[in-house]
Image (cartoon, helix red, strand yellow):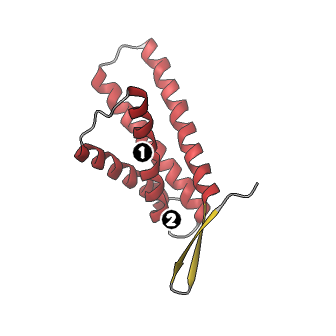
Amino acid sequence: MKMPHIIVKKGQNIIMINLKKMIKALASGYLFTLIMLLVLTYLMKKFTWEEKMINIIIIGIYAVGGFLGGMYEGWMTGSRRVVWGALYGMLYITILVAAASLISRGTAYKSYELAGIILCGAISGAAGGFFSP
């Protein structure tokens, strides 16, 4: 089954965006995040850590997941890697926050905190796109 393409006309250039590439990058980022959160869960059973330390580790896992996914997205697209990495990072973090909000039946973030979280996701994804091969 072919994945749909979005065609954006800009002057005489036609940019085709393959949604399959973005889905692959998101799946790889979420797979990394899942594995690392499972490792963190195991380590939390073995060791006693403060809640603040656990929150910092979780934010680090999300940042690395955004970086690696942005790197993969930039590698697959080949051009405008930083832009695609930033878009990936924003989408990655937005889906994570939306899923957490659905699970907890409401968001615990204020609008400026949410904007900061999405900006951090965009920065980590853009950095991944910048360093992609």
| Residue ID at (63%, 64%) | 5
- Quarter of the image containing the C terminus? bottom right
Residue 104 lies, with reference to residue 30, above or below; the image says above
- Quadrant including the N terminus: bottom right
Q: Residue visible at 47% across and 20% down?
A: 41
**Dot 2, how many residues are within 10 Å of its Cα: few (below 14), some (14-19), or many (20+)?**
many
Residue 81's disc is: 2
Q: Is residue 130 above or below residue 61?
A: below
Mark 2 secondary-structure assignment: helix
Question: 47 and 7: which one is in front?
Answer: 7
Element at label 1: helix
Q: CA distance from mark 2 to mark 1?
A: 18 Å
Percent x, y of residue 22: 57, 55
Question: Of discs 2 and 1, which sits in the foreground?
Answer: 1
Is residue 49 visible from the viewing direction of this image?
Answer: yes
- Packing grade of label 1 (10 A; few <14, some 14-19, many >=20) is many
Task: Say which of 31 and 56 sits in front.
Answer: 31
- Is 41 on the left-hand or right-hand side of 111? right
**Residue 69: percent from left, percent from top:** 52, 49
* In the depicted structure, whether residue 26 falls above or below residue 105: below
Label 2 sits on what residue type? Arg
Q: Residue furthest front?
A: 105
Q: Which residue carries the number 1 mark?
A: 93
Of residue 80 and residue 13, the one placed in the foreground of this image is: 13
